[in-house]
Amino acid sequence: GGLQNLTTGVRNTALGANAGRGGSSATFNECTAIGPNALYANVSGARNIAIGPWALASNIQSNDCIAIGRSALYDVTDEGSYNIAIGTYGLHNCSTGDNNVALGYRAGFNLTSDSDTTSIGHYASYSNVSGNTRSTAIGSHAMYNSTGGYENTAVGYTALYNNNYAQSSAFGAFAGRYDTSGNDRASFYDTTCIGYNSRASGHYQVVLGDTNAYTYTNG
């Protein structure tokens, strides 16, 4: 059964072993927990939806989160509100970040405290821990190893795969993944790569096309 520790609350739904079990003297409202241990520790978090084993399991008082998939948003506790994770292990380690969206297997998996990020695709923005606030990764493994750059945009398979600097953009499969020497460690400030396998050589560049690209450098 579920909702074992709920003392006061209205319009809650729980289905599955320990679903919505709640912490000591739980008082939450308008929550839905479906699956074993979904929303397991909730005390006062309101208007949350957890579907899948261990989805939102650690949440205590965060509000307005949606977690669909095994262990999605597992580590949200007190401060990570308004997050959406759809997919197994999506936003798994997000504990205090707000306003994040992850769609796909392990999308945004290691994000902990960043806010306003979007990760869509298999392993999109997987290794991001902190510092990637207001970044967007769309595509399988897009921004996979990005661990410190903010306000980046990556669209395409492995786009900006290793970028750890800020305010860069890449559009196209492999865009911004390699530098012009072929090294799989491209990471630049304020650089834009457009097109399949487009590669930059430094900061403040705009690159159009693949390895035979036109490059504009400013600064």
Image (spheres, rainbow, N blue to C red):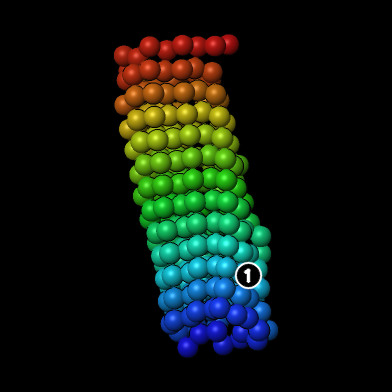
On the image, the x and y values in percent for residue 179 come to: 41, 24
Q: Which amino acid does label 1 sit on?
A: Gly
Q: Where is residue 150 in the image (x, y as percent from the top left)?
A: 58, 36
Describe residue 19's horizontal placement relative to residue 87 as left or right: right
Q: Is residue 187 above or below residue 58?
A: above
Lateral position of residue 55 relative to residue 26, left or right: left
What is the quadrant of residue 140 in the picture?
top left
Residue 179 visible in the shown view: no
98 shown above or below 205: below
SS at circle 1: loop
Closest to the observer, 69 or 177: 69
Res 219 visible: yes
Density class for disc 1 (Cα within 10 Å; few <14, some 14-19, many ≥20) is many
At x 45%, y 46%, the residue is: 119
Q: Name the residue under label 1.
A: 45
The answer to whether 54 appears left or right of 196 in the picture is right
